Image (spheres, grey):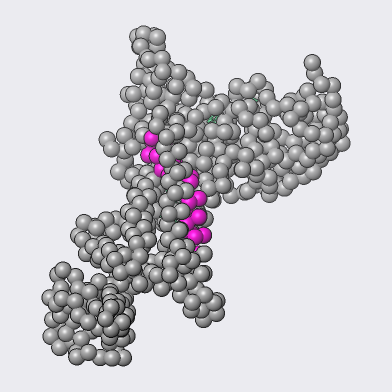
Amino acid sequence: MAKSAFLKSSIAKKYWMALTGLFLCLFLVGHLIGNLQLFKSGYEGALQFNKYALFMTTNPLIKIMSYVTYISILFHAIDGIYLAIQNKKARPVAYAMNNSSANTSFSSRNMAVLGTLVLFFIATHMINFWAKMKFGTGMPLLVKEIVDPNVGAKQYMLIATPESPQQNVPVQGPVFDNNILKKQPIADIYIDGNKIVNKKNNDVLFEGYKDLHKLTISFFKSKARLFNVIPNEGLVFTIFYVLSMAILGFHLWHGFQSAFQSLGINNKFTPAIKTFGKLFSVIVPILFAIIPVYIHFILK
Amino acid sequence: MATKKNININLKIWRQKNAKEKGKMETYKLDNVSTDSSFLEMLDQLNEQLVNNQQEPVAFDHDCREGICGMCSLYINGRAHGPDTGTTTCQLHMRKFKDGETIFIEPWRSKAFPVVKDLVVDRSSFDRIQQAGGFVSVNTSGNTIDANATPINKQDADKAFEAAACIGCGACVATCKNGSAMLFVGAKVSQYALLPQGQVEATQRVLNMVRQMDEEGFGNCTNTGACEVECPKGISLENIARMNREYLKASMK
Ligand code: HEM
Ligand code: SF4
Ligand code: FES
């Protein structure tokens, strides 16, 4: 009996909410450290960020962690929404007058709404970056721009990873992706992920870096029209990201310390946990949010 | 000492004939209410007025009228037991209200506390949770051991006593946005979990009480903390955390 109760009972569901929620907090820290590298500008910054991205998509340990993250998000969201529906049913007739702000915080009363908005953000974010990185065939490869001091003309180098069969190779322009290859075919090659492959025998000729750095910068700097209507989509994305981080902050304002209570931890450390949780819920979202702001408004 | 002052108030009260029928908020005017009277005395005064006018008096729960039985309920102006904290409705006084004020009075709202009539709800779901494990089995065949013969450290004894102060009023459920009974059940589990006498049945107790709580249709705690604020006996959220630990321990066995 105890076993079946471990998934179904109210308290067990709370353990899972808390464990997945705290794991996602840990994930946020890791993700943030990666993102902060975007402040390093120029080619050096791009190389470092793309190396980091390559490491994150290939390292087996990170792979396991990423699956735990996907499962956590799904489980946390499904369990959270399920709990919220059950909780609504526990009060079929609403109060005509309810002064709930007298005894609870805004965040604690709106966890499900805040969480659903976070879920919406995560979905759009994954479509725009994660899916392009993982499945997209249009990702450009990292190209270095070199200005020859004697001639003054710009030259472009396709940058190879240490594992690449071929060293850096000169290319025509600053962008190197499958679209360019369609317009200006070079022999019989195509780009598969971060590899350049011979069409005929599928030999890997070259291994480069997917230029996630460029994708990110151009995403927040884009002057294109969103859905062909709203001008300056880069600004729209920047505002959307800042708002989403504020929402995440509210979710964590209550959520961080709440997870410890759910796990049965309420003791002399609780005041410290609460303080840390509040700092966490303010600092982490702000650090995430200043990245698009920096890219859109400050980065040249 | 007493401020001799009477106030006139408007009341919006939930009226419902019986468990089956749909209820609705009704408005009443009540003049000359002494600010020294208790909230329940004010309702008595309203009922006298209703009876004099050949109307059905408002049904509401009460018993001891001294804050210890837990019978009085009432969601007053959007808060369980009214605007004061740490009190029951019977201990709430009319000096907390202003002349001309409109006061909302509603029953506890919870699927597990169905309305019986007007402001009276059926709280027997709490009894069933208690029956599922809120007790210690003592052999009373003549060789009962004196409770004081078992040494208990002061800290645990105090905490158990604080948990045992719960009067089962249901304010925690009423105020919780999730209609969760975890403060009540947490207090009842803690009261025994902290004492040596409670250890024998500890595993079954927490599993059975939580199962019964879920079956009754109470919601799931999201740690908003409203219950702790509104509990007339100051039962702490620590008791919910303790229940969660006890439940984890019991589920592992
Ligand atoms: C990065 C993303 C997220 C993080 C770091 C996070 C973190 C947390 C934490 C730590 C808690 C407290 C757990 C507890 O009280 O035991 C929580 C609660 C909650 N989360 Fe999230 N969350 C995230 C995304 C989401 C999403 C996408 C949803 C989906 C709809 C969601 C819905 C909820 C709900 C409804 C609760 C309250 C449930 C309860 O306390 O029982 N969260 N979250
Ligand atoms: S925990 Fe407090 S509010 Fe809940 S039933 Fe017990 S005394 Fe009433
Ligand atoms: S009537 Fe007994 S506590 Fe209020």
Check residue A260 for magenta coloring.
yes
Q: Which residues are magenta?
A: A240-265
The x, y position of residue A174, in whole percent, is: 32, 80
Q: Relative to A56, is A280 above or below?
A: above
Residue in the picture at 47% in, 62% down: A293
Magenta-highlighted stretch: main secondary structure?
A: helix
Side of A9 where B224 appears, left or right: right
> Front-most of B235 and B56?
B235
The x, y position of residue B128, in whole percent, is: 48, 34
Side of B141 where B125 appears, left or right: right
The C terminus of chain A appears in which quarter of the rendering?
bottom left
> Front-most of A223 and B229?
A223
The x, y position of residue A218, in whole percent, is: 41, 73
The answer to whether residue B51 is visible is no
Residue in the picture at 31% in, 91% down: A183
The N terminus of chain A appears in which quarter of the rendering?
top left
